Image (cartoon, rainbow, N blue to C red):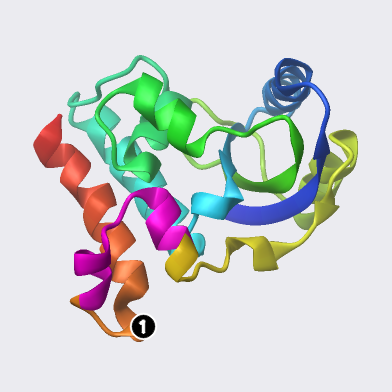
């Protein structure tokens, strides 16, 4: 199962924040990846990135040794972790965070429930808000999609522009 949730709040120290999240993931035997939600265009964006990353590992076509990092590469549409982190990584200060939680692969033996998700959000002192996952034209620009690309599709197809970038990672690897 892949569960995508959004939240907002203030991150005072990214390293401490990440330690809490990854300790929580280990304790509950789930996989968690975090993103700056301001460059996420809907839940399908992260579901697709996660599915691509899992398939890459299954085919032994992964670029990284870590599923969470592979998810980050796909979600960012980038080939290099350095670029992916600067584009999609969470940042210090007030902002929006997207969480991808995965529990149905061999490395994850726990189960994701609404209660577990709420516990995670509370642990990191954020407020759940799935609306931060809704994308718009500004999201596309922050993601790196050009005006020409945006103008080639109707607003109803904006999400497809992101999904195309996610899928392209297989080609650019």
Name which residue lies at 88% across and 35% down: 123
Range of magenta residues: 139-151
Instruction: Please tell me in which quadrant of the rendered image residue 29 appears.
Output: top right
Name which residue lies at 47% across and 60% down: 139
Q: Give the dominant element type of the magenta stretch: helix, strand or loop.
A: helix
Residue 165 or residue 55, whichever sits in front: 165
27 w.r.t. 84: above or below? above
Report how many numbered discs are placed on residues in the image: 1
Instruction: Please tell me in which quadrant of the rendered image residue 116 appears.
Output: top right
Name which residue lies at 39% across and 31% down: 84
73 w.r.t. 129: above or below? above
Q: Position of residue 146 (x, y in %)?
A: 26, 59
Left or right: where 7 falls relative to 167: right
Residue 106 visible from this viewpoint: no
Residue 2 in the magenta stretch? The answer is no
Residue 146 in the magenta stretch? The answer is yes
Left or right: where 105 falls relative to 134: left
Q: Position of residue 70 (x, y in %)?
A: 36, 29
Q: Residue furthest left?
A: 171
Residue 173 visible from this viewpoint: yes
Q: Position of residue 125 (x, y in %)?
A: 89, 39
Label 1: which secondary element:
helix
Q: For the C terminus, which image quadrant? A: top left
Residue 162 or residue 54, whichever sits in front: 162
Name which residue lies at 37% across and 47% down: 49
Residue 166 or residue 150, whichever sits in front: 150
Left or right: where 72 falls relative to 3: left
- Crowding around mark 1 (Cα neighbors within 10 Å: few <14, some 14 to 19, many 20+) is few
Q: Position of residue 104 (x, y in %)?
A: 50, 42
Location of mark 1 (residue): 155
40 w.r.t. 97: above or below? below
Residue 93 or residue 157, whichever sits in front: 93
């Amino acid at each position: 199962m892949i569960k995508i949730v959004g939240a907002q709040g203030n991150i005072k120290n990214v390293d401490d924040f990440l330690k809490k999240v990854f300790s929580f993931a280990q304790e509950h035997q789930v996989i968690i990846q975090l993103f700056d939600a301001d460059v996420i265009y809907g839940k399908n964006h992260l579901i697709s990135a996660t599915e691509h990353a899992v398939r890459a590992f299954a085919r032994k076509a992964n670029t990284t040794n870590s599923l969470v990092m592979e998810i980050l590469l796909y979600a960012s549409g980038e080939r290099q972790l350095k670029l992916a982190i600067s584009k999609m990584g969470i940042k210090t200060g007030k902002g929006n965070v997207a969480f991808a939680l995965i529990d149905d692969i061999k490395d994850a033996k726990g189960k994701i429930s609404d209660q577990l998700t709420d516990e995670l959000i509370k642990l990191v002192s954020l407020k759940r808000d799935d609306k931060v996952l809704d994308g718009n034209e500004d999201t596309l620009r922050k993601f790196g999609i050009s005006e020409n690309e945006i103008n080639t599709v109707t607003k109803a197809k904006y999400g497809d522009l992101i999904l195309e970038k996610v899928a392209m990672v297989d080609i650019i690897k």
